[in-house]
């Protein structure tokens, strides 16, 4: 002991030890230790140690600070439903009452935007101008990310007894290795997509002669899209994946989180006009879920998702799930059938991207980490049903 005291063992335990027997640890303490608990010394014992006395260990002197028992956790699918409902409510609250108005007030206080415009006009790059639109949207996206991280950290502890790191946001520098890998995978996917569409005569690519420096446009777009992708990944491949894995296993978690991901985009423009939009987004969600499964953390899904949006929108100028990029390096004119190209919703609603994703899912599987290695091993411990 740090204070140098020697604990006096109760008489009945000492007698058992002297007779060559094995002392019996109280069942409550033994169960706590097996569950990973940490013994807590009571205030009375601490006072005696500080005074240089010899504490006598008794049943009331030693307690145990133990984590939530697996048997006390809600079923994973119930935990996922609670999180999904609170996420939607909180996200809408943040959008309507917090992030957008806060970004607006901050931008006007810093004189980034002119006064007298409505909120809708302020978030329209054609009205505001790209130079003023970018910082306003960046403030809004970062505000949403902060709200979602706060909610996920709180519910992760309450519902899953896990930290953000255990939900996939692992610490350390492992994400640096996932950065080039995620961007490379996204580039391969969309080079394949645009190349196949061009060979079929459905895509016609031309240089846009952008108003902004190409490197600056790509770099700023990446930083702008990163928090937006992180919000969706923390929700779908973070909390929902982890909770569903307890009930349905890893592949059930991949499919379940993909269903949530596709549903989250059902409010996007032109979604209802394209019958394959949900199927394409579901397959995209499975692809991103496989990235979580094979690498064991959220870093590859976040970078891959950001790279996907970057290549699709600011690089090739295609709609990103119904949303048109305000500026792009290239312009891809789509002339093929909507059933294959996705039309105004973008490639996610086209059969061509669905077909292209299948071999890319196989490529992701080849990149899986060996069990027990890497950032947040792909082998996630079970914590009850």
Image (cartoon, helix red, strand yellow):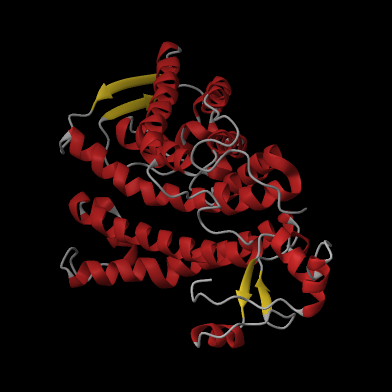
Q: Is residue 359 left or right of residue 16?
A: left
Residue 123 locus on image (x, y percent): 31, 58
The quadrant where residue 186 appears = top left
The quadrant where residue 112 appears = bottom left
Q: Is residue 220 left or right of residue 94?
A: left
Q: Residue furthest front?
A: 18
Residue 16 locus on image (x, y percent): 83, 69
Instruction: Give the residue at x 35% y 61%.
Output: 140
Q: Is residue 134 visible?
A: yes
Relative to 227, say whether 328 is above or below: above
Q: Is residue 55 left or right of residue 209?
A: right
Residue 328 locus on image (x, y percent): 27, 35
Relative to 188, say whether 43 is above or below: below
Q: Residue furthest top?
A: 199
Question: Is residue 14 or residue 33 the one in the foreground?
Answer: 14
Q: Is residue 118 visible?
A: no
Pick the quarter of the image with the N terminus. Answer: bottom right
């Amino acid at each position: 002991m740090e204070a140098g005291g020697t604990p006096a063992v109760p008489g009945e335990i000492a007698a058992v030890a002297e007779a060559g027997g094995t002392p019996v640890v109280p069942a409550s303490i033994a169960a706590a230790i097996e569950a990973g608990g940490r013994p807590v010394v009571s205030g009375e014992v601490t006072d005696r140690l500080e005074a240089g006395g010899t504490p006598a260990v008794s049943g009331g002197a030693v307690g145990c600070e133990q984590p939530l028992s697996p048997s006390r956790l809600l079923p994973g699918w119930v935990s996922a439903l609670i999180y999904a409902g609170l996420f939607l409510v909180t996200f809408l609250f943040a959008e309507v009452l917090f992030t957008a108005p806060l970004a607006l007030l901050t931008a006007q206080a810093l004189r980034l935007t002119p006064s007298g415009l409505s909120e809708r006009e302020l978030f329209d790059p054609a009205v505001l101008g790209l130079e003023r639109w970018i910082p306003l949207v960046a403030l809004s996206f970062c505000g949403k990310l902060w709200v979602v991280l706060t909610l996920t950290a709180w519910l992760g502890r309450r519902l899953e007894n896990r930290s953000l790191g255990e939900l996939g946001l692992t610490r350390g520098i492992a994400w640096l290795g996932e950065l080039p890998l995620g961007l490379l995978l996204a580039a391969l996917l969309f080079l394949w997509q645009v190349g196949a569409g061009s060979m079929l005569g459905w895509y016609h690519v031309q240089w846009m002669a952008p108003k902004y420096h190409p490197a600056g446009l790509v770099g700023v777009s990446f930083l702008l899209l990163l928090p937006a992708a992180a919000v969706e990944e923390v929700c779908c491949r973070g909390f929902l994946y982890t909770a569903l894995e307890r009930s349905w296993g890893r592949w059930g978690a991949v499919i379940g989180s993909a269903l949530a991901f596709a549903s989250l985009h059902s409010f996007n423009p032109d979604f209802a006009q394209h019958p394959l939009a949900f199927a394409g987004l579901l397959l995209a969600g499975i692809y991103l879920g496989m990235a979580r499964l094979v690498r064991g953390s959220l870093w590859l899904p976040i970078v891959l998702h950001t790279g996907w949006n970057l290549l699709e929108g600011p690089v090739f100028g295609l709609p990103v799930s119904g949303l048109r990029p305000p500026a792009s390096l290239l312009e891809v004119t789509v002339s093929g059938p909507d059933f294959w190209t996705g039309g105004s919703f973008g490639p996610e609603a086209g059969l061509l991207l669905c077909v292209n994703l299948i071999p890319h899912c196989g490529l992701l599987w080849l990149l899986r980490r060996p069990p027990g290695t890497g950032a947040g091993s792909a082998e996630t411990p079970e914590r009850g049903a």
